[in-house]
Amino acid sequence: MILSKFVDELPIPPILKPRWKDQFYTYYEVKMTEFKQSLHRQLNDTTVWGYEGSYPGPTIEVESGEIVFIKWINHLPDKHLLPVDYTVHGAHKDVPEVRTVVHVHGACVESESDGYPEAWFTKGFKQVGPYFKKQVYRYDNCEQACTLWYHDHALGITRLNVYAGLAGFYLIRDQRERLLNLPSGKYDIPLIIQDKTFNKDGSLYYPKQPDKPIPGLETSIIPEFIGDTILVNGKAYPYLNVEPRKYRFRLLNASNNRFFRIKLDSEQLIYQIATDGGLMQHPIGVKEIMLAPAERADVIIDFTNLEGKNIIMINDAPAPFPTGDPPDENTGTVIQFRVTLPLSSVDTSVIPAYMMPIPHINEQSASQSRYLTLNDNMDQYGREWMLLDNKQWAAPISENPKLGSTEIWYLINLTTDSHPIHLHLIDFQILDRRDFDVDRYNKEKIIHYTGTAIPPEPQERGWKDTVRANPNQVTRIIMKFGPFTGLYVWHCHLLEHEDYEMMRPFIVIQ
């Protein structure tokens, strides 16, 4: 179904108001419900899931250091909106079909409030998973200003719950960022970018079977799901009327699998000011920005002196990435900016030359190096099955960093996909990527490098919580573990991979 482009205006998610706020803490309540919403004017209203009656969910804005409590409330129906695959770990018939648990992605948070995949709960908190039986989560917000997001993380059905609509922005603000005089207020706009496919009746399509159906096995686990329609803030191909001035956009790739390589058809520079974990040392002017699923980039686009122009944000990343098909006219189009509004006041915002120091973590400070493979296997039904370090989710925990210690992880990609690897709790720095001989590694289990180390791309030189581990490369990251101890996870953020075993627990020990 081909939908007309730029006929619906971009919705801006509302800011969630707290139920309670004093000088000590802030308290929110957030309900998850099923409802109908218009995702494009040529489609019937689509049944989706969302937080507080909206898809995407409302934006939660907090101050750095603010103690925030959130009660997450599941009011979803007992039957899933999308086809559940009961052969997947955590989603067997002995657990409720609809389960949720919320993870604030990138949060510095105690383990009991991190959204552990088996800490799920059902409607009315009637049934709960085997871990962390609590409904009110505590967020200490010990990070600097940054763009985070919250989404569902229930074991075995994360891909379905996020695709159904359970995602929203979580923004941390601080005084240092305010003093930089970046575009703010109505000129600071979050953009959550996702791909979906629709049935003729406007309902969400998600496959019930892999490409090659397996007799007698109704299954929805596929190696990756790629949608044919691009949505921004829950609208397909929206437009945004802007003034001829600078705007800040918080870009988030919240797709299940699709990578985005973002450009402007005007070929003007995009000024990136922040990575996943907050401000960079210096802004960089780039023609394109690469975003794997779960990655964020804060950018400034300057529409000054462009009155009357229409500028289209386009995407040219192949799907699946990097060896899939290039985008077509639909998946290559993201959003249109129309420079039609009069200037409401003089634009005094700036793109600062310098924002904040980012001290490099010294490799010599690392007390441990871990060599961890990304593996491609076949399951008993002949389906593709990705693993981390060739271990399933339920295997004994093998990564147990000490509180306050620094480690280097070597992510050894033996597959043909690029995997966005996400670690909970901490931010890391990318050291380098380096080509190696995969065949030789598979035979001898020795890394034989075939090229020199490639430093991180300029747009990755900041604090990160998700990194692209590319095929035929060893990607090295360095991080200090803390400030909390306890049970967390690391995983591939291609949601079909994560749901089908490409996730592992780790424990930070005292």
Image (cartoon, rainbow, N blue to C red):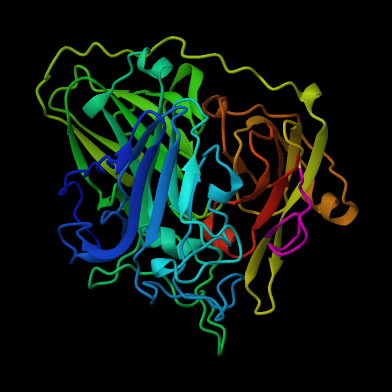
Which quadrant is home to the N terminus?
bottom left
43 in the magenta segment:
no
Q: Can residue 87 be seen?
A: yes
How many discs appear? Answer: 0
Q: Can residue 258 be seen?
A: no
Q: Is residue 129 left or right of residue 160?
A: right
Which range is magenta? 387-400
The front one of 48 and 310 is: 48
Image height check: is 111 above or below 290? below
Residue lying at 75% horizontally and 34% vertically, measured from the top left: 408
The answer to which image quadrant residue 429 occupies is: top right
Residue lying at 77% horizontally and 45% vertically, measured from the top left: 400
Q: Position of residue 257 (x, y in %)?
A: 49, 55
The answer to which image quadrant residue 118 occupies is: bottom right
Q: Position of residue 19 (x, y in %)?
A: 29, 44
Q: Position of residue 364 (x, y in %)?
A: 81, 22
Residue occupying the far left of the picture: 342
Residue lying at 74% horizontally and 39% vertically, measured from the top left: 409
The front one of 158 and 223 is: 158
Q: Is residue 367 left or right of residue 340?
A: right
393 in the magenta segment:
yes
Residue lying at 22% horizontally and 46% vertically, measured from the top left: 238
The front one of 420 and 55 is: 55
Q: Position of residue 383 (x, y in %)?
A: 62, 73
Residue occupying the far bottom of the picture: 216
The front one of 414 and 19 is: 19
Main secondary structure of the magenta stretch: loop
Which quadrant is home to the C terminus?
top right
